[in-house]
Each structure stands twice: as structure tokens, then as C-alpha cells.
Image (cartoon, coloured by chain):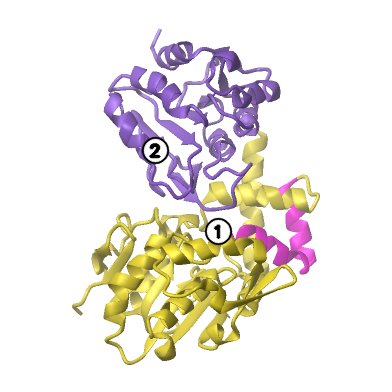
Chain colours: A yellow, B purple
Amino acid sequence: MADKTDDIEMRLLLEAIYHQYHYDFRGYSVASVKRRLSQARERFGCHTFSQLQDRVLHDPAVLPELISFLTVQVSELFRDPTYFRGLRELVVPHLKTYPSLKVWVAGCSAGEEVYSLAILFREEGLEDRTIFYGTDINPDALKKAEAGVYELERIPFFTENHRRAGGKSSLSDYYTAAYGAAVFDKSLRKRAVFSDHSLVTDAVFAEVQLVSCRNVLIYFDRDLQDRAVGLFKDALTRKGFLGLGAKESLRFSRHADAFSEFARDERIYQKRGGP
Amino acid sequence: MTSAPIEAVVVGASAGALEALSVLLPALPTDYPLPVLVVVHLPPDKKSVMAELLQQKCRVGVREAEDKEPIRAGIVYFAPPDYHLLVEPDRRLSLSSEEPVLYSRPSIDVLFETAADAYGPGLIGVVLTGANSDGSRGLRAVLSAGGTGLVQWPDLAYASAMPQAALDACPGARVLSLPEIATYLLECVTPV
């Protein structure tokens, strides 16, 4: 039963990573973690997860790359334009009533979503009163987010997304192209704070009016999803907004009652009033 | 036929998928005792109407899969556009927006490989019409876990490349016509 041995070794590997480095992937969805760890195993030339465990325990240099395998980093500027259009048309009017705003992009990866929101908030005249928190557990991704540099070949796609999201300007106003890369304007991140935060192990760090956490919860098992949504619930102000990925819902969540569906198709929820 | 009881069916299709599935899925009776998990390659930004279209023709329930949903018999689950569909060891579905595999998200390989892991010999993998090579690796995983592989006759398929690639990768798979695949799916669950 080679497969069963595989599963045992994988569990031990995740335990090892947790005990040595405090990265906790034990509550992640097994199928996708196993796929990604198998890719990592191949990349490191290991035949078994136990060999990979040996490498990661004894060579700290292995960890960052392993974290990059384990954290999914696929995003675009204005990914799912209808979501951003929904924020712009339905949520922004509410946000305009606040004198100051905090926005939390949980699992921000390389920052695409933070930049999208910063651009949207600028276009809507909200940028100056907003602080954006972009958090992730992947240090490499956070560095990329800080830098705000994306491959030039991705730009046409970002531009089309921005347009479909109801963009009020040209995306080219926000970046400079050089050497095959697009560098996003520094001014966009002057109100952004990128920092290390784990939805698995860390606590709430601020009170926010909007949480955007898309295509992150799908990698968690049910218990971990409940923990993360609980954090969002605690972080949000009364009547604050939570945006999820296109195929995510709070339907099965333990905290479902704490939210109402605000814009169903755009997967935007609102924290209920009340105590 | 293998001695292990069949627990689930996974199906992959690309170009020509709707026509092929319109033969296969309506053949299943209301009380079909297996879940059927389907990946069809679709453009990422389209709302898929595939499940809705097929629901009208089918007696079994047909719908798009939801994240962490427990897999139930007698339901056909479609991968939503732009997401991979995976089977968890505890027999729940999960979605993922990991990078496309062979330019495809959803990917047939991803579904088949994770389902093979979850169901082992209790799985039937079906590769239908398509113009690429997605599904070959996945079908190999199904077979090496002890499951059964069915492939549509390439000559009879709307696009032959995908079934041909699956056959090349998996000599142990059975080559059948669409009606024969339907019959197989019915007979594999009929008590003798």
C-alpha cells in the first residue's frame, strides 16, 4: 500500500514544518497540498516525503521555496472584474460615509489585489483616507508585493480587467514600463502595509471596514475556514464588508449567521449589525 | 471487471464535450448509485451553462461543484469555469485556483489524480473527445491505483487527439464507443 505510506509521510512532513518553523499547513485541504508537495518533492529530487522532511528540517534554505510551493500564487490585477465593479458600484457609496477606512486583503500573495483596490479607491476619491493591509504567510510573495513589479506580458490582461471593472482612467497611468516589466507607481503603495500574518495561527490586528479574501479559503479544510471567517468577523466593524472568491460562500460556515448576503453574485457579504 | 466495488466515475472532455455528454449522461437512471465528476474545458470568464443544459436532458441531478461539498451518489458534478476540481480523501470536493495544467483550468489530470488517490480501485476514469492531451496523466493515475480506464474510440470522437493521447499513455484502458461507455457505466453497478 504505497499510497498509505505516502499519506503518513506527508502528515509527518507537515508536522515537521509546523514544529520547526511554525508554518501550519495541517488544516489545509489534503488533495491540493499533496499535489503541490509532490511537485516540490520532484523539484528537490526526493523520492519520498520523508526525504523531503529530512531536507527541510536540516536545511533552513529549503523552507522558503517549499513555502512558495505550498502557497498558491495565482492572481491578476482586477481578477474577476465583476467583483470590483460590485465593490465600486455597491460598496463604495457606503465606504464614502466613513471619515477613515481600513481595508484588509487577507492572503494577498504578490499584491495584485492590493494594487487593484488602491487604484479603485483612488478613482473613487477614497485613497487618501484609507490604509490597506496586505497580509500573507509567504515572505517572497510579500517582497514582490512591496516591489509592485509585474511582468509586462501580463499587462494587456490587467488592462482589460481594469476596463471591465469600470475603470475610470487608463491603467497605464499607474505604471511605468521598463526592461520587460511594469513598475507600479510608488504612490499607490504609500498607504499600503504588507505584512506577515497567518489566518491559521495569528489573531486579529486591526478593525477594518472591508476584508477581501478571495480564493484563499478554498485551500483550507472546514475547521480552518471557520477559524478564518471568525477572524474576519472579529476584524470587521459593524456593517463592514467581506468579499470572497467567485465560487466561495459562507453557506457552510459556522459564522454564516453573522453575515448577510450583500451582493450575491459578486460574493460580497455584510456583517450584520446587532451586538 | 475489477473485484472492488465501484464508488465513483470521473469524466474528462474538451472539444465536442456537450454532444458527447448529451449521449452519456442522459443514459443514467434517476437512482444511479454512483457520483459522476466531470471536467470540461471551458473559457475561464464565461458563466458555464453546461450543467444547466445537461440538467434538462438528464434524470440524475446535474450541477456545478461547490467547495467542501460532500460527494453524493446520483449527482453529476461539473468543475466550475476557471477552477480546478479536486477530490479530498474524506470524499468531499474542493476547488482550487492553482495555475492551469496544460493551459487548462479546470484540468482533467488534476481531477483524475486526486480522485484516484481518494477512491483507488473503486474508480472509473473516462476520457472523451478533445483536442489536447489533458487526461492522459490522470488516466494513468486511475489505472495505477487499480481503477478502470475507459476511452472513447478516437475515430468516433469529435476531436481525436485527447482520447488518442490517453490510449497511448494507458494501454490498459478499454476503447469503447459512447453508447458502449454508457452501457458500461450502467452494468458496472448492476448486481449480478
Q: Is residue B108 left or right of residue A6?
A: left
Helix, strand or loop status at disc 2: loop
Quarter the C terminus of chain A occupies:
bottom left
Q: Which mark is residue A239?
A: none
Q: Main secondary structure of the magenta part?
A: helix
**Residue A204, visible in the rendered structure:** no
Numbered range of the magenta stretch: A48-72
What residue do we see at 47% from left, 11% from top? B180
Residue A41 in the image: state x and y as whole percent: 73, 50
Residue placed most toward the observer, A38 or B90: A38
What residue do we see at 46% from left, 13% from top? B184
Quadrant for residue A140, please give it.
Answer: bottom right
> In the rendered image, which residue does mark 2 sit on?
B71
Quadrant for residue A252, please give it.
Answer: bottom left
Helix, strand or loop status at disc 1: loop
> In the rendered image, which residue does mark 1 sit on?
A26
Residue A108 in the image: state x and y as whole percent: 53, 70
Residue placed most toward the observer, A145 or B92: A145
Alpha-carbon neighbours of circle 2 within 10 Å: few (<14), some, or many (≥20)?
many
Question: Which residue ends up furthest to the left in the rendered image?
Answer: A274
Q: Is residue A201 left or right of residue A264?
A: right
**Residue A34, visible in the rendered structure:** yes
Q: CA distance from mark 1 to mark 2?
A: 22 Å
In the rendered structure, the residue with mark 1 lies on which chain? A
Q: Is residue B126 magenta?
A: no
